[in-house]
Amino acid sequence: MNPFFDVKKFISQSITQRNESLLSKDLETSHQKLSDALTGKSCLVIGGAGTIGTSYILALLKFKIGKLIVIDTNENGLTELIRNIRSSDDLFIPDVIKTYPVNFGDTVFEKIFYAEGPFEVVANFAAHKHVRSEKDSFSIEAMIDNNVFKANKLLTLLTKHPPRHFFCVSTDKAANPVNIMGASKKLMEDVILSHAEIIPIKTARFANVAFSNGSLLLGFLERIAKKQPLSCPLGIRRFFVSPEESGQICLIASILGESGDIFFPKLDMENDLVAFSDIAIAFIKALGYEPDICSTEAEAIQKARLVTATSGTYPIYLFDSDTSGEKPYEEFFTDEEELDMESFSNLGIIKKTAQLNNTSIQAIIENLEGVFKSHNQVEKNQIVAILKEYLPNFEHIEKGKGLDQRM
């Protein structure tokens, strides 16, 4: 693979088809408000070593914040984050910047919170984000523990020392969810928003972040580097934002939103949905190859072994989507939700979302925790049934096969 392959340029030309950030106008209009709100402030970012968390921090450091504390379980990711920050020439690096490789659900996190706080800005990006995480009940339990139980524990902590701004990232898959990850994120939204009268809480439903950690597209780079074939589902279209745009969306939402707001990028169903297969073909061509479309995984693997620097083609296996929880398209809001499409040029806001009260939310959490405390393995359909009882628009797509069974 060409070591100078320009991922940012490829995203702009072949995925988002935008020459400048979707948020450029909103950032320009809101710059002074953001500067006033952030200058000298103490900020805590949880899950800051991931793609969106890192991008949020880079957007945050365009302003003169006073202190930055970053939490993440990925020690190597935190190391790279600091290297990235200190190698950049367009950031304001605060005098106090610390990273801690800990889990935000552990007791040591609370010690850090009290020792390093108080914080004016708290942003949480720690989440299980993959549909593949519903492959069995153990993975589902870990996902719900991270996305729901730990978020609830964090909110309990924050009610004792409320920040001026709290943000927790959600997903487009929370709108009319068809997979357990999306359902867990919808439950997470309701958990955090049930505290919106005590803490100024904002969130955002996301498009796919192009070439984010663990994504299919970043996997393309790994496959090419290892002389392995590409593999991609047919008929799956998604909205995309760049990593830079993902951080900017979260920055605007976290600081300028009103408590209870759910932000989303204004993207058009007709013009902005992009098929994964189209991106895969464009990616192969951008590397100087022609796609060699294979009929089986085995054929693609065999042909990949024969690829050389002078080969004219590169193998790719395209298949009809047949795994659980895969939605053929994306949406950011439901028909029942009230929208504000005027406050920002390229961001919409879901307002006044109907919420259960905190007592009802805690009862649902206790129900799920009780199921998981059983020594017996919980069946996947049991968890789906509990979530569906709470989320009546949760229509789980079950096909008996997970993404780990695909190349």
Image (tube, rainbow, N blue to C red):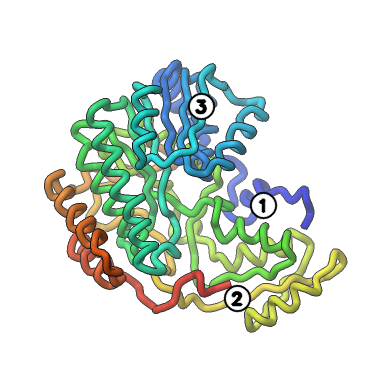
Query: Number of numbered discs present?
Result: 3
Q: Which residue is mark 1?
A: 10
Which percent across, then down, holds residue 312?
A: 82, 70
Mark closer to the chain start, 1 or 3: 1
- The crowding category of the residue bearing disc 3, from other C-alpha atoms within 10 Å (few below 14, some 14 to 19, many at least 20), is some
Kindly indicate whether the residue at mark 3 contacts the one at mark 1 (C-beta within 8 angstroms). no
Which percent across, then down, holds residue 124?
A: 39, 39
Query: Based on the displayed image, in which of its 4 quarters is residue 93 positioned?
Result: top right
Pick the front one: 123 or 295: 123
**Residue 371 bears which disc, if any?**
none
Query: Based on the displayed image, in which of its 4 quarters is residue 47 positioned?
Result: top left
Q: Could you tell whether 6 is left or right of 343 in the image? A: right
Pick the front one: 226 or 231: 226
**Residue 98 bears which disc, if any?**
3
Mark closer to the chain start, 3 or 2: 3
Kindly indicate whether the residue at mark 2 contacts the one at mark 3 (C-beta within 8 angstroms). no
- Which residue is located at x 18 percent, y 53 percent? 366
Mark closer to the chain start, 1 or 2: 1
Q: Separation of disc 1 and disc 2 at Cα?
A: 21 Å
Q: Separation of disc 3 and disc 2 at Cα?
A: 44 Å
- The crowding category of the residue bearing disc 2, from other C-alpha atoms within 10 Å (few below 14, some 14 to 19, many at least 20), is many
Pick the front one: 140 or 394: 140
Which percent across, then down, holds residue 325?
A: 39, 69
Query: Based on the displayed image, in which of its 4 quarters is residue 167 positioned?
Result: top left
Q: Which residue is mark 2?
A: 318
